């Protein structure tokens, strides 16, 4: 498993436990500039790093935290997470 790079100040790490995604489509409906539905029925974070464990991750700016938090809050199986600059998972 690869270690995630540390998050810079003013940025967030957005992660997706893709193996547990049930493909409901809520994230892609709420934040279509970050989330897209894939052919296998699950969602993807656009242009994200694909980890060996199947998770996806990407660093996002402060300005994009709110819309992705809305996506995370809408996820029925809680597989979208946001981690702050101190490494604390906030959702
Ligand atoms: S909201 Fe959650 S379960 Fe639904 S497609 Fe997005 S990540 Fe998957």
Image (cartoon, helix red, strand yellow):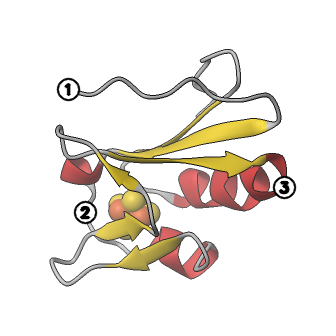
- Whether 14 is drawn above or below 76: the answer is above
Where in the image, quadrant-wise, is ligand 1 located?
bottom left
Residue for point 25% across, 63% down: 22
Image position, residue 4 (x, y; %): 42, 28
Q: Nearer the viewer, residue 79 or 65?
A: 65
| SS label for mark 3 | helix
Res 91 quadrant in image: top right
Label 3 near label 1: C-beta < 8 Å?
no
Q: Give neighbour class at mark 3: few <14, some 14-19, many 20+ (Cα, 10 Å).
A: few
Which of discs 2 and 1 lies nearer the camera? The answer is 1
Res 24 quadrant in image: bottom left
Image position, residue 30 (x, y; %): 62, 74
- Whether 3 is drawn above or below 65: the answer is above
65 left or right of 41 in image: right
Say which residue label 3 marks. Answer: 63
Residue at disc 2, CB closer than 8 Å to ligand 1:
yes
């Amino acid at each position: 498993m690869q270690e995630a790079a540390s998050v810079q100040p003013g940025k967030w790490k957005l992660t997706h436990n893709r193996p547990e995604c049930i493909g409901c489509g809520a994230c892609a409906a709420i934040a279509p500039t970050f989330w897209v539905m894939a052919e296998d029925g699950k969602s993807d974070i656009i242009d994200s790093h694909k980890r060996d464990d199947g998770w996806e991750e990407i660093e996002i700016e402060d300005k994009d935290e709110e819309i992705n938090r809305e996506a995370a809050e809408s996820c029925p199986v809680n597989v979208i997470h946001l981690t702050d600059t101190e490494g604390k998972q906030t959702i």
